[in-house]
Image (spheres, rainbow, N blue to C red):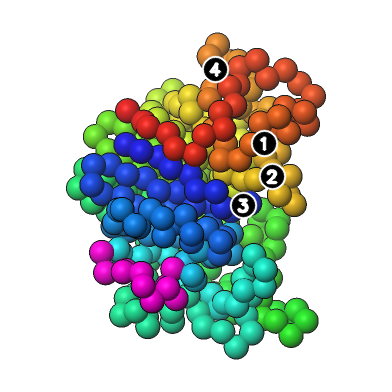
Amino acid sequence: MEFRALRALQGDAFIIKAGDKSILVDGGMPSTYGQIADWLDDNLLNAALITHVDYDHLGGLFNWFTDRDSDLSSCEFFMNHPEFPCEYQGEEVGYKHGHSLKDLLSKRGLSFHQLTTNQELNYGDLKILVLSPDESVVEMLYKDWGTNIVYDDGVLKYKKAQTQSGDIINKSSLILLVSCNNTQILMLGDSHCDVASTSLRNQGYSIGAPLPLAMVKLSHHGSQHNTSAELLQLIDCENYYISTNGGRYDHPDEETILLLQQRAAELSTCFNVYLNYEIALDIQNKCNFPLNNLNFIEQCSVELK
């Protein structure tokens, strides 16, 4: 199984391929579409799954849907609450008499499907199990949506709270377990660590019986608010991916790197931390603690067995 991280600036965009089947998980920034288009020159995408409504995870889809030369017919599209209006403002997405992502896809004769806990998708040997969100969280997202729309300098935007309790967008992020035969990848989107931990426990995993994985895509670009010691104890994995260029948020946070270092040391092993930008030295420089149990690898494509 091939795990490929696209260079999406501070965003997320991944292609996972097994045999002749492939899926896109998140669409990155608007400029990320160039890499998606390059992939589509020689490959088909069977599904595109957007983990949550945030500009750095879906920006590339706007350019894809408006590219009249693109063929969307082989692809299924999944996203919870796609009523996100769009107009480009640099690399951000806002609204000024624009069209929603749902409308753009509808003009191509297609629509988004909703995903909630325990739904399964199958594309050849590629299997996807949805671990989160449950239906109650999706309902909360829909209800909360209309109460958090604000105007900012005449531009309509969704005002996303950044606190753990109030950030319903990230709380409703898809958590996906993608597998091919016995190889499994955990895609955490921008999910909260407590939600991820609860989702794993609900599937029967525990600290004594962790989920075996070939790769974990760490949540929210390595933010300190989205990874916990408990979450790392619930998984059995030595390969972790952080998607970010560092950017204005200076991700990943050193607190997340420390958690990885401590867990690897506790297990007397070494974790591989994959990066899609050349930021390994930046990470090492800002961490004022030993990183003896972490191996930073700047590599976009990883073959997993």
Which badge, 3 or 4, comes first in the chain's sequence?
3
Q: Position of residue 57 (x, y in %)?
A: 54, 59
The Cα–Cα distance between marks 2 and 3, rounded to whole angstroms, is 8 Å
Q: Position of residue 107 (x, y in %)?
A: 37, 83
Q: Position of residue 11 (x, y in %)?
A: 58, 53
Q: Main secondary structure of the magenta part?
A: loop
Q: Is residue 103 visible?
A: yes
| Residue 73 within the magenta-colored segment of the rendering | yes
Give the residue at mark 1.
Answer: 279
State if disc 2 and disc 1 touch (CB < 8 Å): yes
Eye-nearest disc, 3 or 4: 3
Looking at the image, residue 126 lies above or below residue 275: below
Which badge, 1 or 4, comes first in the chain's sequence?
4
Which residue type does callout 2 highlight?
Gly
Which badge, 3 or 1, comes first in the chain's sequence?
3
Numbered badge on residue 246: 2
